Structure formats: structure tokens, C-alpha cells
Image: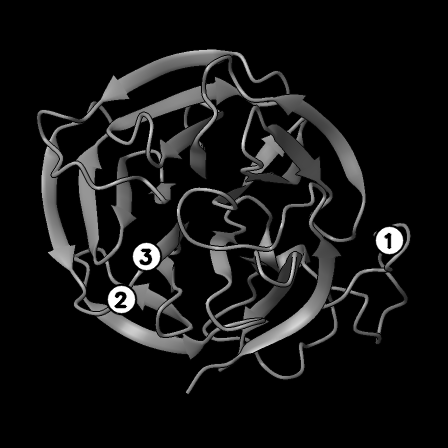
């Protein structure tokens, strides 16, 4: 069975109570393009207006932050659209039928789409897009839509609780807080692999796959202070084979655990 192999971690850049459930502590996370570089965009709900924080993906360094769009206080999911270079948002409780987007680095809202006519009104605690379609889900269900909101289908996963979704190569990946698992599904929603979760039981709230960075130039580890490459032959250089070997190819996953107040970075092993 594949396992999650941790490479580094971050403390939550915005502290919450560590509580789960209801909407307090709902967390969104995605890898986006920020001024030409990869960045990990992070948001967690605090009970009022929230900040989006941009972190260096290789070490615990904050680049920037900004407030969410005015009136958008229950964002529960973030998903970077690689075509438009915007961050899409899913919502819980208020605006639960809405999907919206804002500019990276500014938080200026660029559009909002109401799915009330096509969705089953599940909240958007999980949201992911590859720029061609988007997946949205919560509780036991994930729905798939065209980018203008036409519903393509849905799939139910009995007993699961979808807390976060991310686009991954030729697949989607979500976290199930009930079973404490990372679940990989194919483009048709069929489960193809499960992986034991990360951190405290019941705490996984978001997941982000780095589809922006070139895996051929991704070392297993980075210098923890400056995010620099190391010498050839060390795990800090991309020419060095990873150990243990990654599943299929080099990749990086980020999993946010609200109970721990930790973002775990790593990859799935073969």
C-alpha cells in the first residue's frame, strides 16, 4: 500500500482553535503561480474575515497575504485554475452553492457562479480544477462540472467525508476525514488507491498537489532555511534518486491538519 512520506512541515500561518466540524476551521489550500514562482496558497476560517497566505512551497517562509473578497467569510476550499491564473473558491454554510474566483496576490474577486440550479446543494468543502473541468464536493459526494457550471455527473462514496480535493496527474485526490485516508480517484471517480492519512485522526481539512513545478527539477528535500538546492549526490539535489521511491513519478503533496495546526508536505511512496 502507498504511504505518505513527509519531507517537511509548516505551522498554520493563521492560528485557529484546532476545532473541526461546523464551519469554524474549514481550510482551503492550493499550489498556484505567484509572480512567476510556485506558491502554496492557504486559508483557514477564523469566524470572521479571513486572510489568504502565500507560502514558499519548499520551506516555512511567508511571501505575502491579503484579505478575502468583501463578504466572502465562509470560503472552505481553494483551487488554482492554470488557464486563467485565478484561484477558485468553494464555500460552506453561507454561499454554499457558489463558486467564485479572485486574483492571485490581491484577492480581487473576478467572477462568481451560482450552482443552485445544477448542484444538489452540497457545500463546497472540497474544490479542484485542472482548467478544463472542476470537481466540487462535501460529505459523501463529489460533483463534476464544466467550467461554466454545467453538471457532468456525480459520485457518492458511502461513509466517507470529503474535506478537500486537489487535481493530480490524470486523476483527482481527496482527503476523507472519517476514515483518515488520502484517496486517489480516476477521471471517472473510481477509487484507484487509498493511503493512510497524516496527523491527528479527524483533522485533515485540505490537500494540494503541486501540478505547477517541474518534477524533473524537484529535489526530495530543500535547505530548510533558504529553500536552496544542495550538492549533487545529496537528497537536496534533483539529480539524486529519491528514497523511498515515489509512486509513479516525483511529486509533492500538502495536507493540512486542523487539529495539529500543521501543514504536512511530502509525497506518496511506491
Mark number, residue 24: none
Query: Label 3: few (<14), some or many (≥20) within 10 Å?
Result: many
Q: Position of residue 77 (x, y in %)?
A: 43, 40
Q: Identify the residue at image location x=35%, y=37%.
A: 92
Q: Where is residue 37 in the image (x, y as percent from the top left)?
A: 68, 35
Query: Label 1: few (<14), some or many (≥20) within 10 Å?
Result: some
In the figure, is residue 124 to the left or right of 233? Answer: left
Secondary-structure class at tag 1: loop
Q: Identify the residue at image location x=36%, y=40%.
A: 130
In the figure, is residue 149 to the left or right of 171? Answer: left
How far apart, in angstroms, are the residues tagged by discs 3 and 1? 35 Å
- Quarter of the rendering containing residue 40: top right
Give the mark toward the camera: 3 or 1: 3
Position above or below: 92 against 149: below
Position above or below: 166 against 176: above
Q: Name the residue under label 2.
A: 160
Q: Do the residues labelled 3 and 2 touch (CB within 8 Å)?
A: yes
Position above or below: 126 against 265: above
The answer to which of 99 and 231 lies nearer the viewer is 99
Secondary-structure class at tag 3: strand
Q: Where is residue 73 in the image (x, y as percent from the top left)?
A: 48, 25
Q: Name the residue under label 3.
A: 162
Q: Where is residue 164 in the image (x, y as percent from the top left)?
A: 40, 52
Mark number, residue 228: 1
Q: Which of marks 3 and 1 is nearer the N terminus?
A: 3
The N terminus - image quarter: bottom left
Amino acid at each position: 500500500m502507498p504511504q505518505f512520506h513527509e519531507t517537511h512541515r509548516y505551522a498554520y500561518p493563521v492560528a485557529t482553535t484546532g476545532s473541526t466540524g461546523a464551519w469554524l476551521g474549514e481550510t482551503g489550500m492550493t499550489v498556484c503561480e505567484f509572480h512567476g514562482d510556485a506558491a502554496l496558497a492557504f486559508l483557514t476560517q477564523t469566524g470572521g474575515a479571513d486572510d489568504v497566505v502565500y507560502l514558499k512551497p519548499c520551506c516555512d517562509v511567508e511571501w505575502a497575504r491579503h484579505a478575502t473578497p468583501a463578504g466572502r467569510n465562509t470560503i472552505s476550499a481553494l483551487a488554482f485554475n492554470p488557464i486563467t491564473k485565478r484561484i477558485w473558491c468553494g464555500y460552506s454554510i453561507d454561499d454554499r452553492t457558489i463558486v467564485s474566483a479572485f486574483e492571485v496576490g490581491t484577492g480581487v474577486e473576478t467572477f462568481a457562479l451560482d450552482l443552485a440550479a445544477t448542484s444538489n446543494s452540497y457545500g463546497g468543502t472540497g474544490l479542484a480544477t485542472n482548467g478544463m473541468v472542476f470537481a466540487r464536493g462535501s460529505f459523501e459526494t463529489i460533483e463534476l462540472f464544466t467550467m461554466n457550471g454545467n453538471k457532468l455527473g456525480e459520485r457518492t462514496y458511502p461513509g466517507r467525508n470529503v474535506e478537500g480535493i486537489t487535481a493530480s496527474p490524470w486523476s483527482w485526490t481527496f482527503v476523507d476525514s472519517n476514515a483518515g485516508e488520502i484517496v486517489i480517484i480516476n477521471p471517472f471517480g473510481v477509487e484507484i488507491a487509498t493511503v493512510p492519512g497524516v496527523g491527528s485522526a479527524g483533522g485533515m481539512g485540505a490537500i494540494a498537489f503541486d501540478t505547477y513545478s517541474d518534477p524533473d527539477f524537484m529535489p526530495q528535500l530543500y535547505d530548510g532555511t533558504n529553500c536552496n538546492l544542495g550538492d549533487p549526490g545529496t537528497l537536496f539535489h534533483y539529480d539524486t534518486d529519491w528514497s523511498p521511491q515515489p509512486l509513479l513519478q516525483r511529486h509533492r503533496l500538502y495536507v493540512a491538519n486542523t487539529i495539529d495546526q500543521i501543514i504536512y508536505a511530502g509525497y506518496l511512496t511506491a
